[in-house]
Image (spheres, rainbow, N blue to C red):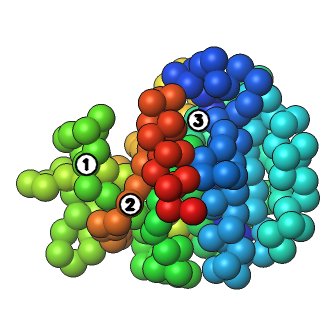
C-alpha cells in the first residue's frame, strides 16, 4: 500500500516559524510533525510515500532524505510555487500513487490514531477518520451514521481528521463537480477535495470511523507549542 502526505501548504498562519521551515517539518516531541506519520506508515507496512511540496520544497529532501531511515521509499511531488490545494495535489500525485487504494494524511496534524484501523479496501470511493469537534471547528464537517456511512449533513457532525483511504476513482469526475472554479483551468489544475467528497457522499460512496483519542490540528504557533509541551512531558 502507498500513502500521500499533504505537505505543500504555505503555512501563513504559522509565520514567522514557517519563514524558513515548512509546517510539516516543525518539531514536536523532539521530531518533525511529518516524521510521526512516516513512523506510523512504516509500521503499517506501507512501502512508498508521496510527499507533495511547494513552499520551501527543497527542505523536505534535506531533512527526510529518501525515506530509508524509516524503511520507506519517498517520492516528492512538487506542485510549483502555488500549492494545488488538496484535490489538485492528490490529482497531481496520482501517477506516483498508482491505481490501488492509498492512504492520505495531512502533514500538519498530530494524532495517536492507530493507522492499522484503516481499511486496505474501502467499500466505496473513500473512508475518512473523523474526530470530536475542537474549539476552532465547533460545528464539524461531516455526519457519521451508525452504519458507518459519512454524509455532508446530519444531526451530529464531526471534524475530518485529515486521515483517509481513497480510491483514484474519486477524482474521475473532478471537472464535472468543480469545473469553472478559479484554478481548475490551470495546468496542473488547482482545486479542493471537499466538493468531490461531498459528491461521493451523496452517492453513498464514503464510509468513516470516529477516533475518540488524541488529535491536534497544528494550525497556530500556540497549538504547536502546547502539543510540543504535552509530548515532551510524555517522553
Badge 2 element? loop
List x then y, in percent, for residue 210.
Answer: 30, 67
Q: How many marks?
A: 3
- Compared to residue 125, the image places residue 136 above or below, namely above
- Between discs 2 and 3, the one toward the N terminus: 3
Q: Estimate how packed mark 2 is, as few (under 14), some (14 to 19) or many (20 or more) residues with alpha carbons within 10 Å.
A: few
- Between discs 3 and 1, the one toward the N terminus: 3
Which quarter of the picture shows residue 189? top right
Residue, disc 3: 85
List x then y, in percent, for residue 225.
Answer: 50, 36
Give whichever of 78, 222 is nearer the camera. 222
List x then y, in percent, for residue 106.
Answer: 56, 49
Q: Gap between marks 1 and 2, in whole Å?
A: 12 Å
Q: Residue at x 63, y 61 (%)?
A: 37
Q: Residue at x 87, y 35 (%)?
A: 58
List x then y, in percent, for residue 128.
Answer: 41, 63
Residue, disc 1: 133
Residue 235 lies left or right of residue 219; in this view the side is right
Q: Residue at x 45, y 30 (%)?
A: 222
- Compared to residue 206, the image places residue 82 above or below, namely above
Q: Can you say which quadrant of the picture contains the N terminus?
A: bottom right
- Between discs 1 and 2, the one toward the N terminus: 1
Residue 95 lies left or right of residue 39; in this view the side is right
Residue, disc 2: 214
Q: Can you say which quadrant of the picture contains the C terminus?
A: bottom right
Residue 200 lies left or right of residue 114; in this view the side is left
Q: Residue 40, can we see it?
A: yes
- Compared to residue 183, the image places residue 41 above or below, namely below
Say which of marks 2 and 3 sits in front: 2
Give whichever of 72, 148 is nearer the camera. 72
Q: Gap between marks 2 and 3, in whole Å?
A: 26 Å
Amino acid at each position: 500500500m502507498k500513502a500521500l502526505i499533504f505537505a505543500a501548504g504555505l503555512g501563513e498562519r504559522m509565520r514567522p516559524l514557517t519563514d524558513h521551515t515548512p509546517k510539516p517539518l516543525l518539531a514536536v516531541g523532539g521530531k518533525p510533525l511529518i516524521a510521526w506519520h512516516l513512523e506510523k506508515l512504516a509500521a503499517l507496512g506501507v512501502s512508498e510515500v508521496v510527499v507533495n511540496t511547494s513552499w520551501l520544497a527543497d527542505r523536505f529532501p534535506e531533512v527526510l532524505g529518501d525515506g530509508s531511515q524509516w524503511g520507506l521509499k519517498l517520492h516528492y511531488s512538487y506542485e510549483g510555487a502555488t500549492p494545488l490545494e488538496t484535490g489538485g495535489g492528490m490529482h497531481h500525485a496520482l501517477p506516483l500513487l498508482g491505481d490501488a487504494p492509498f492512504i492520505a494524511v495531512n502533514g500538519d496534524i498530530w494524532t495517536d490514531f492507530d493507522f492499522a484501523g484503516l481499511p486496505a479496501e474501502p467499500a466505496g470511493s473513500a473512508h475518512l477518520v473523523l474526530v470530536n469537534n475542537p474549539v476552532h471547528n465547533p460545528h464539524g464537517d461531516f455526519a457519521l451514521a451508525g452504519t458507518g456511512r459519512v454524509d455532508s449533513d446530519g444531526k451530529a457532525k464531526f471534524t475530518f481528521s485529515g486521515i483517509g483511504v481513497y480510491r483514484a476513482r474519486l477524482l474521475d469526475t473532478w471537472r464535472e463537480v468543480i469545473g469553472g472554479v478559479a484554478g481548475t483551468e490551470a495546468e496542473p489544475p488547482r482545486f479542493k477535495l471537499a466538493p468531490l467528497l461531498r459528491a461521493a457522499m451523496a452517492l453513498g460512496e464514503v464510509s468513516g470511523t470516529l477516533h475518540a483519542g488524541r488529535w491536534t490540528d497544528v494550525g497556530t504557533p500556540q497549538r504547536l507549542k502546547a502539543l510540543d509541551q504535552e509530548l515532551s512531558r510524555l517522553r
